[in-house]
Amino acid sequence: MNKIGSLYQLKERCCLVFSSKEAAVLGGAVAGWPLEALYHLDDLVRKLAAFYSKRFNCNVTVVSPKDLVVLLEVDGKFKKFLTSNGEMGWILFVDEHYNDYFEEVNFQQTKNSVEEAIQMP
């Protein structure tokens, strides 16, 4: 998962995305929170993002399963993304298996799916 400019979708995990690499390290912002954290503890994860935002004086956002992101930059174990909310931030990839939490999305397939959903009665 190192193709700059490619569109990716989270599969079954959620991630905290930090506006700076330094905050990502301080917050332990690793890719791939368990799916249960999103569905059963959604409020807690969002509160954690708000806590980190305030604590580290930076923006922290939650990217959920099925959300789309664009890979903007790779710097060692850090990857910078543009989220579907228009926010940019960093996720710390502790090791290569975190790449498995994302799958590359074909833009044309995504466009066709959206168009089909819009046309449905």
Image (cartoon, grey):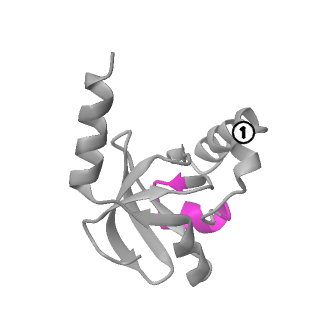
Please give the count of numbered marks on the rendered protein: 1
Tell me the quadrant of the picture where the N terminus can be found: bottom left
Q: Position of residue 25 (x, y in %)?
A: 61, 68
Looking at this view, name the residue that lies furthest to the top: 121
Q: Is residue 43 left or right of residue 64?
A: right
Q: Position of residue 47 (x, y in %)?
A: 70, 36
Residue at image coords 44%, 65%: 103
What secondary structure is found at the residue carrying circle 1? helix
| Whether residue 34 is situated above or below residue 113 in the rendered picture | below
Tell me the quadrant of the picture where the C terminus can be found: top left
Q: Quadrant of residue 86?
A: top left
Q: Residues within 10 Å of mark 1 (few under 14, many from 20)?
A: few
Q: Is residue 38 left or right of residue 58?
A: right
Q: Position of residue 78 (x, y in %)?
A: 48, 74
Residue at image coords 40%, 50%: 68
| Whether residue 88 is situated above or below residue 78 in the rendered picture | above
Residue at image coords 64%, 47%: 52
| Whether residue 97 is situated above or below residue 13 in the rendered picture | below
Q: Quadrant of residue 112?
A: top left
The front one of 66 and 24 is: 66
| Residues in magenta, as a range | 17-28
Does the magenta-highlighted stretch encompass residue 20? yes
Does the magenta-highlighted stretch encompass residue 73? no
Q: Is residue 24 left or right of residue 112?
A: right
Residue at image coords 70%, 36%: 42
Q: Position of residue 2 (x, y in %)?
A: 36, 78
Hey, what amino acid is under mark 1? Tyr
Looking at this view, name the residue that lies furthest to the front: 121
The front one of 2 and 45 is: 2
Residue wearing tag 1: 39
